[in-house]
Every structure is written in structure tokens, then in C-alpha cells.
Image (cartoon, grey):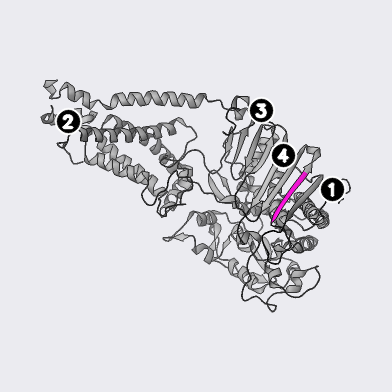
Amino acid sequence: MKNIEPLNMTGWQILSLTILRITIGWHFLYEGLIKVFNPEWSAISYLNNATGPFASIFNSLASNSAALGIMDALNQWGLVLIGLSLMIGLLSRWAAVGGMALLALYYFANPPFKGLGESSMAEGNYLIVNKNLIEIFALWVIFQFPGSKLTGIDRFLNFKWSKIKN
Amino acid sequence: MEKNNISRRDTLKGLIGLPILGYFANRFYVSNKRTSTKPKVNWSEYGISEYDPDIIPATGYSAKGDKIRIGIVGFGGRGSYMCRALGYAHESWAEGFIKNGSPTSLLKNFLDQEDLNIEITGVCDTYSGRAEEAVETVCTSIRSGGSSKADAPKIYPTYMDMLQDDKLDAIIILTPDHLHAKMAIDAANAGKHVYLEKPMCQTADEAKTLRDTVKKTGIILQVGHQNRQQASYMKAKEMVSKNLLGPVSLIETFTNRNNDHGAWIRGIPDEANESNVNWKEFLGDKPLREFDPDMYFNWQKWFEFGTGPAGNQFTHEFDGVNQVMELGIPKTVVATGGNYYFKDPRDIPDVFNVIFHYPHRGLSLTYDCTLRNSNVRPMTFMAEEGTMEVGVTFSVFPDSRSSKYKEFKENPDEPIFTYNPKSTAVDAISSATARSYFESGFGYTYNKGERIDCTYLHIKEWLNCIRKDIQPSCSVDRGFEETVTFYMSNLSYLEKRLVEWDAENENII
């Protein structure tokens, strides 16, 4: 991964990036832990009920028990690890990429291409853009602006940034 | 600090996520503890699991053994549905479910159905256009379970001609209601097994004769109440039979629809006329009269050929209740209603209300129907300890005066038991409250979260019973209860009186 040095940002800019990273991390961590703590949780119904152009791929994942086991573990622990990583700012750029990949799976399993009525149980109204897509792009921002190198554990991983110390 | 080129302030900044993580951990612990200490009924103590994926027996039946040769009688509104349940989907139907070259989930559900090991050898319909459509459907290249294209079935002029075929094992009757009894009796006497669309018969007397004929001949008859395969009904039955609701005093059932199709206006094909409709054969035992295409194609609108909302719709509800509680025939019935909205030729009501009394069971069953409102209400069992609402899913709500579930009575709107066979638990990520499951209604049931056509399972059960010579879930006895019950309501409506059942002599008083 190309090493991006922190930009010359103002304190407020850094703070806003940090809050964005930590809140997304919080969301991922909670989604992950809820699934880890619920012994009955499985991605099966989500995969079975997939809609849109990729529905058959998701359906076939649900019908293969090995694939389903991987999907379940990937979801549970993937969410937990990405969440932790984003919250404390450790390897955040990698976490952002992983988070975008997971969100892309959720997005394409139920893409709101048709707008209203596509998903009767969704809590809002979406046409093409939904919260998954927005979170994907928010993570892209995290990826592009490595604030964790200032306000995360990532700071301690690379001492050559000493030049930007106060 | 200076040695590492990181100041104290930088260190603090770098660790900013940690106190927030600590706060998260604290909140997660508290919220998790609150959820797990919420009062919860230990259902497993009563032998009930909240998720039971293998509840539908028909999913496990094998189609191995002799190939069963079937004839289809009548190919109207129900014909193409039935053919899909049997494994034959018309190309024009399938085309609607292919997007970007791959099948959508509904078509995939169809293709995933097992090969039932059958052959459709004959079809007949009193309208030649529909007989041809039946042949076209059977000869489709879209088959479930990897089956190959079938040979064209023979078109018989009448069902009696079809019954002459010694090689025919069974028939599926999808004709108007007034022909059900006669056709099923003739088939039984010819030694053919019968799948008979609901309602089983038009009148109580017909039902009695058919029941006795089926018992005498020993054929296997399944009445087409495909919701016998509905997982939620099976689960609801467990709930009642383990007496977890206490005595049930009232059961409410409903049908509400608000469109012409729902009011049995089904259209008349342009090509249909006296030359291609066998009007006399359609009339059967009814008095001869002039050809009337409205009466022929929209026969449900008249009590002479159909059975009104009672036979068409209530029977679905009744059979559901009968499954859950084994109610049988009521002691007395009173019905009222009227034809208020549809002014086209018809004599059936469009608003219909019935009370079925079961004094021997300490309960009443009600049915309310309007054809000018489509608000969907669940079948509701009202019992001393709680209220059970049954649809494709079902929920039990505690009664505010319940003694069994008193720790829940402060939240009577929160179910103490929910059975949702569509889903094992919450989905992947709740960006939406995102349980995006479909309200596909009663045509489908769910097994291990997988959607399956109920009619396919109902047919599969019937075929299994034929191969093993055992009785199906919706046997002629259940059909007898269904017909007598709905017929009593029609009689009450038409004669404007309380109708009583004399169980000993099997007579309506």
C-alpha cells in the first residue's frame, strides 16, 4: 500500500476525520459483537433473500454449507476486527479497505436500484444510494486521509513522521 | 519521549481511541446484560423450539418408486400454478423471471423443486383454448429438478373419456366447484386417486357421498388446501396442543380484497364462443340454459356454480384453524351480509360475516370478508393466557390478565414468542432494520429459511401417500368438515336463519 503522509491539516479537520473513523468503528464493532453473542445468527436468510443482478451468487453461497460457514465467520469476526481497528486507529487504512469490501457485499446483496418497495423492511427510502453506499464512501475518505497516523495507534508504527511533531 | 521523536501530547493524541473503546465496552456490557436478563419464557421446557427448520414432513418425502401417471381436469385460473407445482413452467411465465440472463429467486425456487417422478398423460377442459394451453405447458422446456422435456399429453373431450384410460393412476381436478363432487366420485369409482381443489364439494350431501365413496374404493384423495404445508400452522398447532395459551374462547378469521380479480371478475377470452366451449358438459347436473360466457368464465359469481366467499376464501381460513385446533364441524352457524358494491350479474355477497359456534369446545369462530378493502389481518386465536396471531409467521402476545405469563403483562404488545421461518435471526448488517424478507403471502412456506411453493409440497405429500397407501394431511375427512362448515354458512346467509348440525345423523337442521 502506498504510504501516504499526513497532510498539513488543521486541528478541526483532524478532529472531524477522527470522529468519522471512530464512529464507523463503533458501528462495525457493535454489529460484529451482536452477531458473535447471538448463537443463532447466520447470514443464511440475508443471502437467500438477496435481490438484484447478483442474487444468484448470494443464493448459491447460502446453499453451500462450507461457503456459508466462511461467510458467517467473515461477517462476525471481520466486523469485530475492522471495528476495533478503526476505533483505536491501528492499521486503519487496511481496515477501511476491508470495511468497504464487506459493505459492498451487503450493498450488492440488496441493491436499492429500483427505489421504493424493493425492501419492504428497510427503515428509510433509498434509490441507488443507501446508507451502506454512504458508509463505503466514508471509509474511502478514511483511506485517503490517514488521520489515524495522527490520532491513532498508527502514529507509533512509523517514527519517521517525527517531523510533524509539535 | 523526545528520544522517540514523539511528544507526550502526540502520544495522547495517538491513544484517543482507547477511552472511547473503554466507553463502548462498558455500554456494550450494560446493554447485553439488560437483554439477557429481560424475562424470557423458557420454551424448550415446554418442548418448543423457537426455530425448528425441519418442521414440514413433505420436504423429506422421496419420489422414488413407480412413476405416477396423472390426468388434469380443468385448466382455468389454477392450471398454470398447479403445473408449476408439478414441475412444468410455461416458457412465457419463466421469461418474466429471468433478469440479465439469470433466474430470479422465484424462478430458482421453481427450478430447485425435486422431480416428482410423474407423467402427465392427459388433459381436458370444456374450453378447447385452455386444453391446448395445458398441452403447451406440459411440453415446456422449463422443468424443475433437472427433468427433461415431456411428451405431449392427450386431449380428452371429457373427463369421463379420460377415466377410461387403464394406464391412468390419478387425476387432478381443477374445475368449477359444482363439478368437484361428481368428478371425484366418478374418478374414485374408476379406481383413480384424486387431488381435488378446494372447496371439496358444493354441499354437505355431496361431501357425504364423496367421503363414503372414497372410503369404499380405498383411493387416496387429497383436498387442495396447500396451507397444510405451512410451517407456521404446524408450529401454532404445537403451541395449542401443549396448552400454552390456555382455553381459546374466540378465533377470528378474515379475507379482505379490493380489486376486480378478487371479486371474481376474471375476464372472457375474445376467442371463446359456443363452438369451442362445451357448455353442456360445463353445466353438468345443472338445468340446461343458453350459453352465457360471463357465467362460464366468471362462474364464482353465482352460488349455482361457485360457493361464494365462504367456499372460495373462508375454507382456506377454516382449514388453517382446523389444522391448529382440530375443530371439526360447528354446532350452529349464523351468517349475514349482502351484495353492496358489485352491480354486475352475480348473486354472491361482497360483504359477508359469519359466526360458527362450538359450544362443545367452549369457543366461537368468526369470519369477516369484504371485497372493498384490502387491509390484511392475521388469523387470531384469543385465549385466556394470551393471543396468538398466525400468518406465514406467528406471534404470541401475553394477556394482561394472564397468570402463566404474568411477568410479561406490562408489555402486552411485545410478543413472548415469535416464529419466523423466513429467517434464522437478524441479517448481516442492520444498515436497514434490514430484514429484507418478502411478503410473498400464503403461496409459499419456508424451510431452513428457504422459500418453497406450498402447492408443490401438497402434491408431493399426495404422491407419497399414493405410493405408500397412507392417508394425506387434507384427507376426505378433513374435506368433509370443511364443506359442511362453509355450506352451513351459505345456507344461513341464503335462508336468513340459524343453521344447526346434527352430528349423530350427519344432517343439517
Chain ID at mark 3: B
Q: Which residue is drawn at 28% across and 39% down?
A: A96
* Left or right, A115 with reference to A15: right
Q: Where does the image place residue B178, in percent across and percent down from the top left?
A: 76, 63
**Disc number for residue B250:** 4
**Disc number for residue B24:** none
Q: Name which residue type carries label 3.
A: Arg
Q: How far apart are marks 1 and 2 (CA)?
A: 89 Å
Q: Is residue B354 magenta?
A: yes
Q: How far apart are marks 4 and 3 (CA)?
A: 16 Å
Chain ID at mark 1: B
Task: Tell me the chief SS of the magenta region.
Answer: strand
Chain ID at mark 2: A
Which residue is under mark 3?
Answer: B401
Residue extending furthest front?
A: B340
* Left or right, A147 with reference to B361: left
Of callouts 1 and 3, which one flags the residue occurring earlier in the amino acid sequence? 3
The image quadrant where one finds the N terminus of chain A is top left
Circle 2: is it few (<14), some (14-19), or many (20+) Cα within 10 Å?
few
Which residue is under mark 1?
Answer: B500
